[in-house]
Each structure stands twice: as structure tokens, then as C-alpha cells.
Image (cartoon, rainbow, N blue to C red):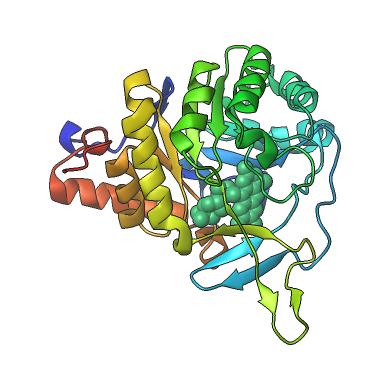
Amino acid sequence: MEESTNIAVEFAGLKLANPVFTASGTCGYSDELADFMDINKLGGFITKSITLKPRKGNPLPRVVETDSGMLNAIGLANIGVDSFIAEKIPALEKLTVPVFVNVAGETIEEYVRVTEKLAGQKAIAGFELNISCPNVSKGGITFGTDPMQVSEITSAVKRATGDKILMVKLSPCVTDISVTARAAIEAGANALSLINTFTAMAIDVETGKPVLANRTGGLSGPAIKPIAVYLVNRVYNGVAKAAGVPIMGVGGIRSASDAIEFIIAGASAVAVGTANFIEPGCAVKIAEGIKKYCVRKNKSVRELIGSLQV
Ligand SMILES: Cc1cc2nc3c(=O)[nH]c(=O)nc-3n(C[C@H](O)[C@H](O)[C@H](O)COP(=O)(O)O)c2cc1C
């Protein structure tokens, strides 16, 4: 392959064949996807959030379609870290691409315990710290909106990761995302992912009630993409570029061109979420589309990162 059209990237010390990941919570634990796509054709895989104990999540309905997007209030439903290790790690061990496990919890101690239990697993390249979930009553977004708490939780979890990468997932529901980004970087984050969903609401006008049983949910999909691109660019210019910390761009990506927007804005990699519900397997097509773009432009992905012309 010509170096000029190479789509391989480095991400926090990892060598990725291409920059495309699955976004947390939209592709399960990986085994669910086997019929739809070859995960080994991606840059890497991110699991759904894992907590210390199993969680049923929020009552139904917990998903609703909106204009150009969806609202979800899943509430971190998952099988808990012990069952995850027993039942899901074997499939992840077979993958040849790097795996990030997304970690969530109600207390800092819970995040640390989950990370400690997983830190010795060979199948795992790194952790994604979910401090930005809008759909849980304890923990979640409350950690991610206060820079002091971002700092505290990042350094506590960093001590538990051993030699594995710590990527901190930021919430867009803040006044200035570069403040929380800086707090995470100064506390030891090796990478940042942004953005998680926006807290939002849909109302059934016949009943006058919220559509979601949880009342609010997280807005994702194409509706949030331009905001996510802007926030990636803001964090890249304001703090991440100077610190040498790579960004995983997330939010409304459904095509190669969407992914390239994030890369030009400053993302070194991207993650595809809601689009998987419309076309499972689209992440592989997006990686192929990025390759075609690079050939057409005679550029490598590395050259594109943060190449915004202003
Ligand atoms: C149904 C659903 C479940 C999600 N679950 C998680 C989760 O468990 N942990 C997490 O960090 N983000 C979760 N997210 C957020 C996504 O990873 C992503 O940050 C967000 O949806 C924006 O990307 P998108 O517009 O491509 O979906 C979830 C999103 C959706 C739509």
C-alpha cells in the first residue's frame, strides 16, 4: 500500500489498521455481531458499559426514534463484570483488533473494582471510562460534568489500569468541554472519546406524558453530528493536540464522509454508534470508504488528522 494513501493510524500507542471502531452500547459484547460484520476488519472494538454487578437497566420503553436520531435510556443494562469475564472475554480473545472495555459505576470505588478485575485480561487493550451516561440516577454524567470529579475518578481508575490505555469518554452536557478534557488529561487519561449523548426528552402529546419511562434519554444519531464535530475540534485545538492525547470522535457517524469530518476536525479514530441499528455492519463499509477517499485525495489518514483549513 502506498504510504500516501495508508489508512493505518496510531492511537495512544496502538497500531490500528484503520481508524474505525464500534461505539459503546451499540454493538453489545461483540459476539452479537458475528453474523453482520467481521470485526477484525475494523480498527478496534468498544464493548457496552460493564458495571460491578449485573444491571437490568431502566423500565421500557427505553428507546424512541426522533428527527434524525434516537433517544435511549437503556440505563447501563449489562451482565456484570464477573459474567463478562466468564462468558464474553473468550470471544474477545479471538479478535485480532484492539478491544476497549467501557467501564461504568455508581461510585469511584465501583469503577476502580471493575477495572482491577479486568486489568489482567490479555484480550483487553484499554478501558473507556464512561463518566457521561445521562440515563442513570447515580454516577454516570454526574462524574463527567464537574472537572474536580473528572480529575478524581480519572486518577483513581488510572492507578487500576496497569499498563493498559485509559480513554475518558466526555459528556457534551457542559458549558466548556475543554475544561473537562483538560481535567481528564492532567489526571492521566491516555486518550479521550467524545461525545456521549445529550440529555433530551420526547413527549406523547395524546397522553401528555414523556415517551420514555425514564422521562429523559440520551440523544444520538445524525442530529448531533455537527455539534460533535465542533466539540472534537474545540478539544483538539484547546488541549489535546498540545498534550499529544488522541481523540476518538463519536456522534452521528453513518458514512465515510462523516468519519472524515471528525478526522479533519482532530480525531485520530472514530466510533460508529446509532448507525449500527439502521445498517449493522456499516462500520466496515465506512472503513472501506475512508480508504477510497484517501486514494482519491492521495493522502494518508495520518495527514488528515486535524488538517482543518481555516
Ligand atoms: C442504544 C444506545 C446505547 C448506548 N450505550 C452506551 C453505553 O453503554 N456506554 C457508553 O459509554 N455509551 C453508550 N452509548 C453512547 C454511544 O456510545 C455514543 O457515544 C453516542 O450514541 C453518540 O454516537 P452515535 O450518534 O454514533 O450513536 C449508547 C448509545 C445508544 C444509542
Task: Write down the quadrant of residue 169 in the picture.
Answer: top right
Which residue occupies the foreground of this view, 240 or 55? Answer: 240
Residue 3 x/y as whole percent: 19, 31
Nearest to the observer: residue 251 or residue 143? 143
Residue plotted at (75% across, 64% down): 215
Nearer to me, 28 or 225: 225
x and y, in percent, of residue 263 in the image: 32, 42
The outermost residue toward the front is 175
Whether residue 68 is visible here, answered yes or no, is yes
Query: Does 98 sit left or right of 145 as displayed?
Result: left
Who's the residue at 38% across and 56% down the image? 226
Going 50% across and 17% down the picture, which residue do you hit?
186
The mark total stands at 0
- What residue do we see at 44% from left, 33% from top? 178
Q: Is residue 126 left or right of residue 229?
A: right
Q: Is residue 160 above or below residue 303?
A: above
Is the C terminus in the top left, top right, bottom left or bottom right quadrant? top left
Let me know if residue 19 appears in the view. no
x, y percentage for residue 26? Answer: 61, 53
**Which x, y percent locates residue 101?**
64, 33
In the picture, measured across the screen, residue 112 lies left or right of residue 274, that is right
Image quadrant holding the N terminus, namely: top left
Q: Residue furthest bottom?
A: 206
